[in-house]
Amino acid sequence: MVESLSRIKIKIIIPEIGQADCEFNRLTAPLTVGEIIKRLPINGRTIISKNFIQILIGLKRGVEKPVTKVDEGSIVFWPQSSSICIFTENTTTYTPVNRIGKVLNNLEIFKNLKSGSRIIIDKA
C-alpha cells in the first residue's frame, strides 16, 4: 500500500494512560505541518481547557488557511499561544487556528487528563 505524501501518521502517547493514532495533513496547513514534523518528537506537558488540551511548542508562525470551527478529534496549531491543541468536542475557537490533523482512534484518553500530564508526539 502506498502511503499518501500529504498525510503523515503520528502517535500521541500519554505515559501510563495510553496512545492514540493520529495523522497530520499537509494540505490543510503545509508550512505549519512541515515545521512541526521537523520538531518531532515533541515531549511536553498538557494544559487543560474546557474543550481541548494544549501543548506549548514554542513555534512562531502565523495563521495559514485559518478556521474557527473545529470538530471533535481535530488537531490544530494555535498561533496565538504557539501550541498544538487537541479538541475533545466540536467547538468554535475565539481566534483563528490552523487545522493540522486529526485523532484517528482512542480520543477518550484526552478527555480526563489533568494539567501537567506528560505527552509525547512522534511519527508512527
Image: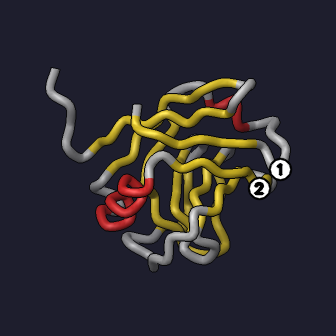
Q: Estimate the x, y position of residue 42 in percent, counting from the top left.
A: 54, 50
State whether residue 36 is above or below residue 20: below
> Pointers 1 and 2 in contact (CB under 8 A)?
yes
State whether residue 1 is above or below residue 123: above
Residue that badge 2 annotates: 47
Q: Amino acid at mark 2?
A: Ile
Q: Estimate the x, y position of residue 92 in percent, counting from the top left.
A: 64, 62
What number is the disc on residue 115?
1
- Looking at the rendering, which quadrant does residue 57 occupy? bottom right
Q: Nearer the viewer, residue 58 or 22?
A: 58
Q: Residues within 10 Å of mark 1 (few under 14, many from 20)?
A: few
| Residue at 67% across, 33% down | 14
Of labels 1 and 2, earlier in sequence is 2
Q: Estimate the x, y position of residue 74 in percent, counting from the top left.
A: 53, 47
- Screen quadrant of the N terminus: top left
| Residue at 79% across, 53% down | 48
